[in-house]
Image (cartoon, coloured by chain):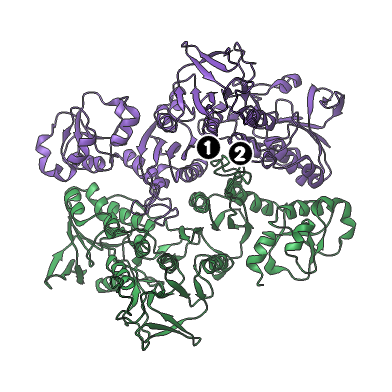
Chain colours: A green, B purple
């Protein structure tokens, strides 16, 4: 059996190594268009930033590893320029020699990845405009930033900016790569402006959560230009660049990073005549078969089923790519492995904060027309509050109303964030409900968590809602109801909700007479905990009351100031 | 309805607050023998160590909180001195006034906790010997350590040690409290000896994992005296102490901390005539009913079902205590909540390292006579190896052979440890198999994890074993088999296995002729990854081969040097 694997990074490399382990006799040829196989593309922004100093650190496994350990024929700088699905052949072009050869396959695995989107805007090919996909990309960016820095005369460099002047970078796109690049460029001392077409960064987050990321970016010196698309690029007289936007702005730049997103590489798939899905990725089944039974596809180029919603989606993440490569190898070797879909679990570090998500977000559920869900906002401590260094975690939990099933979670904070999302990701994978989260038994000691972990709260609070112990309201639905603020007077001095009556929680039982029996009462406190206690008191005394989820803390996310 | 809750810390306090939320009308009386309710007993060692500087930080909720927010009648310094289950009354003694009163209850909740074991050894009541259970205990220890330190004359203090001399502490007991106290006393500059009767510290760990903790303690200056029980205590002529052991040793000490373990407080239960279980704790059902339907018990005083093994056990942890308090309140309020048992998930920080466990350990399974399990040793990186700061996690995973069900995990390391145990704890709770762990989708970005997370490896490697792709051997079963070491020559220079043939992995396919076909071959490398690849090559070439789990890294844990 001869297997040709196209693409030697995450999915392709995993597939090749796994296939060899399962089948010592198979002839395996792995071809990679670029100069390296199995490199750490997730590390590229950090290499630009100098956090990962050596380029060689990014080369996880070399051609030699694949040849010697796995007896795999690896060809780098080698591109597939033709596929005949009928003859079961591929044409390979060796970029070093220009030579084109034809190779027969029994099974073909496509792992071409996704290409950075590079819209045909005026000036997009000007020098100084980069994408971040490959090791050479990172090398080019580093060289561009460092250009002239060996010139110690203090003179202007050929590209026109003085060496003693801070360089200005414009990052286009506020997704993972864009944010990582922004951080790493700031880390290198550049002045960074981030231009994003949409009105929020980090699309996997709901906008009110993204808003917190945006504030954090601004706090660390990143200038944000949201809600404004790039119209083109211009070279100025001095040789530097300008990024022009639809709204008419011109952002000066010594370097531009394009991180608009990626598009599945489907050229080969189209060449092979296999089916492309509605989202523009290669359509595969659970076993990573394409529409042609002898051609498999894995990684960023394929559409996958969203584990939570069942929708086809494009989720270009390394974890799923690796698992898919493994599954394709299993199936080629005659096993019955199946890909279960992806939850889109992801994490990013930005200027000391961690932002992580898993499962469905609210935007997506609304877009799908789903109504059977509710959300809560929580603000638990990363660990016991009495132990030094506890940080607030902002946690949005989305769950099904009818059965309590956990649907998704988004978290942000300075500590302990991805740990909670990992536990919640495992919970979603296993079909857990919020009632299961209530009973979760997680690591607790004062430096690590609390006896009631944030993950427990992510169960208890939704369960209180579903058991009707705590009817919920959100700030976006406040509309003429009676507002009761149960905080203590010193807290009100900091920030007050206009029109709210203040009765501190300890006084509530004695002052019920001040509250209306003919109107719904919305209860407010800092984080919604005391408001929960108050809501219980009111409900049991015959009032109609709801808790404003997340209290003043979520108000600052949801209500524009 | 009148409910009396005995014990105002974790379980009792949770029960009281929850009950009020569910029933605004119930009369709730919470009595606490000590001076404080709802204090952070888990923080006591850190208060001794000065990490939590202010004693007031430990007081999570005060009597006033309970009175004002929850309308609960709280009585501190108030002990139950009599219970009549027939009359449904308790006799309360006010320690301040000496007065004894009788209170009727409809429902009684016992949350008396567990008392530090204080064996009747000679000299145990000498001054300078302390337990660590209450805020006053911590205060006494701090005062004892600081005694005379306001005396700046450099003279000997009244207790006999010179102020410029390092104080010597002996900690008796190598459990959680013992280790936390050892660390905190070292943190305060004391010289610490830890005496432990058993041959390992940290009983929830298997001994080979505990050995790594022991090395870490020693590296940070803690002297270990394992396998030696305390025989008694002596006061020396100079006024300091000596801890005498069964083996005849005398450990000098200026302070002694008793952390031998805890024993459920069952005095009240016996007074009430309710059933005590075989492990010495109060016997309760899933709804926290004792054998008397009007008496509930929660927290460290009760026996709980081990979630994994189904055995009755004593697991004095804060998380389960809180959940049990909540459940008892639910049931009293007429709801059908049930405690699902405990997994014994726990974590401890020791000198920068984190040690965490969940589920069953191997010792326990062996003691229960179970044979349907296997284990693997893994040594994954805490995050992508190419991103700076990755640390090795030592991970032991125990799983059922017949169906792949995850049974337990133990992990140690400097980073990312409790995060993996939390995900695995959630997996165990949800009945996950190692096949589920293979497909887990967790947070990945270079600073946080790897595309294949340690949790994925905790599934993949066991699944390889269960699918017979990788027959496994453990170092403790090496017995005359042929040993093949596939590491590279430079690695052998560091440490070699006597009698092993070295064929570096890249040369293996060409040198198969050097290997015996009539003997089983055990394959060795550093962490068992290359040995896995080699095992696959050997098996597919008709050899009988097994991988030595954990390679040289587990050898150093399992084979005494």
Percent of width and height locating residue A500: 80, 65
Asked if both marks, 2 and 1, belong to the same chain, the answer given is yes
Q: Nearer the viewer, residue B232 or B530?
A: B232
Identified at 70% across, 57% down, the residue is: A526
- Where residue A333 appears, as percent x and y from the top left, is 25, 51
Q: Identify which residue is drawn at 39% across, 66% down.
A: A303
> Please, is residue B109 above or below residue A269 in the view?
above
Q: Quadrant of residue B522?
A: top left
Question: Circle 2 is placed at which residue position?
Answer: B319
Task: Please count the marks in the image.
Answer: 2
Residue A174 image offset from top left, x and y in percent: 46, 71
In the displayed structure, A538 sits above or below A214; it is above
- Label 2 is found on which chain of the structure? B
Quadrant, the N terminus of chain B: top right
Q: Residues within 10 Å of mark 2 (few under 14, many from 20)?
A: many
For this rendering, which residue is in front, B165 or A186?
B165
Q: Quadrant of the C terminus of chain B?
A: top left
- Answer left or right for B38 relative to A201: right
- Secondary element at tag 2: helix
* Residue annotated with mark 1: B345
Between discs 2 and 1, the one toward the N terminus:
2
Q: Secondary structure at mark 1?
A: loop
Q: Is A444 drawn above or below residue B561 in the view shown?
A: below
Between residues A436 and A75, which one lies in front from this camera angle? Answer: A75
Determine if residue B307 is in view: yes
Badge 2 vs badge 1, beta-carbon distance below 8 Å: yes
User: A116 or A171: nearer the eye?
Assistant: A171
């Amino acid at each position: 059996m001869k297997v040709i694997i196209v693409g030697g990074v995450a999915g392709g490399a995993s597939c090749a190594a796994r296939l060899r382990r399962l089948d010592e006799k198979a002839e395996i040829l792995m071809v990679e268009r670029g100069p390296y196989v199995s490199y750490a593309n997730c590390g590229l922004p950090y290499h630009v930033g100098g956090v990962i100093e050596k380029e060689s650190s990014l080369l996880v496994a070399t051609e030699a590893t694949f040849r010697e350990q796995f007896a795999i024929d690896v060809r780098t700088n080698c591109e597939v320029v033709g596929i005949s699905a009928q003859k079961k052949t591929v044409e390979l072009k060796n970029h070093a020699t220009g030579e084109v050869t034809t190779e027969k396959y029994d099974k073909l695995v496509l792992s071409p990845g996704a290409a950075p989107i590079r819209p045909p805007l005026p000036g997009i090919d000007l020098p100084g405009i980069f994408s971040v996909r490959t090791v050479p990309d990172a090398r080019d960016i580093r060289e561009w930033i460092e250009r002239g820095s060996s010139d110690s005369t203090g003179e202007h460099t050929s590209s026109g900016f003085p060496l003693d002047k801070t360089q200005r970078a414009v990052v286009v796109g506020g997704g993972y790569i864009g944010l990582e690049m922004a951080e790493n460029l700031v880390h290198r001392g550049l002045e960074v402006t981030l231009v994003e077409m949409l009105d929020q960064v980090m699309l996997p987050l709901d906008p009110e959560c993204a808003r917190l990321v945006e504030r954090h970016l601004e706090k660390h010196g990143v200038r944000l230009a949201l809600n404004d698309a790039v119209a083109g690029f211009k070279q100025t007289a001095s040789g530097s660049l300008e990024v022009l936007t639809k709204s008419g702005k011109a952002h000066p730049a010594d370097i531009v990073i394009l991180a608009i997103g990626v598009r599945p590489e489907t050229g080969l798939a189209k060449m092979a005549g296999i089916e492309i899905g509605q989202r523009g990725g290669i359509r595969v089944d659970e076993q990573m078969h394409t529409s042609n039974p002898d051609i498999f596809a894995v990684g960023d180029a394929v559409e996958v089923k969203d584990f939570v919603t069942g929708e086809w989606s494009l989720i270009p993440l390394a974890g799923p790519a690796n698992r898919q490569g493994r599954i394709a190898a299993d199936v080629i070797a005659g096993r019955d492995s199946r890909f279960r879909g992806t939850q889109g679990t992801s994490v990013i570090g930005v200027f000391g904060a961690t932002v992580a998500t898993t499962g469905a977000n609210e935007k997506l559920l609304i877009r799908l027309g789903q109504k059977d869900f509710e959300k809560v906002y929580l603000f638990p401590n990363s660990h016991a509050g009495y132990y030094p260094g506890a940080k607030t975690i902002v946690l949005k939990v989305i769950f099904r109303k009818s059965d309590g099933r956990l649907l998704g979670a988004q978290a942000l904070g300075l500590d302990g964030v991805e740990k909670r999302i990992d536990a919640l990701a495992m919970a979603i994978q296993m079909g857990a409900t919020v009632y299961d989260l209530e009973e979760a038994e997680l690591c607790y000691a004062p430096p690590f968590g609390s006896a009631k972990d944030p993950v427990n709260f992510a169960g208890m609070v939704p369960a209180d809602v579903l058991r009707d112990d705590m009817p919920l309201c959100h700030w976006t639905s406040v509309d003429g109801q009676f507002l009761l603020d149960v905080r203590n007077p010193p807290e009100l001095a900091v920030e007050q909700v206009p029109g709210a009556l203040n009765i501190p929680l300890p006084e509530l039982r004695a002052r019920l007479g001040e509250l209306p029996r003919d109107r719904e009462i919305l209860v407010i406190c800092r984080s919604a905990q005391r408001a929960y206690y108050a809501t219980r008191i009111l409900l049991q005394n015959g009032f109609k009351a709801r808790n404003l989820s997340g209290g003043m803390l979520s108000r600052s996310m949801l209500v524009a100031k």
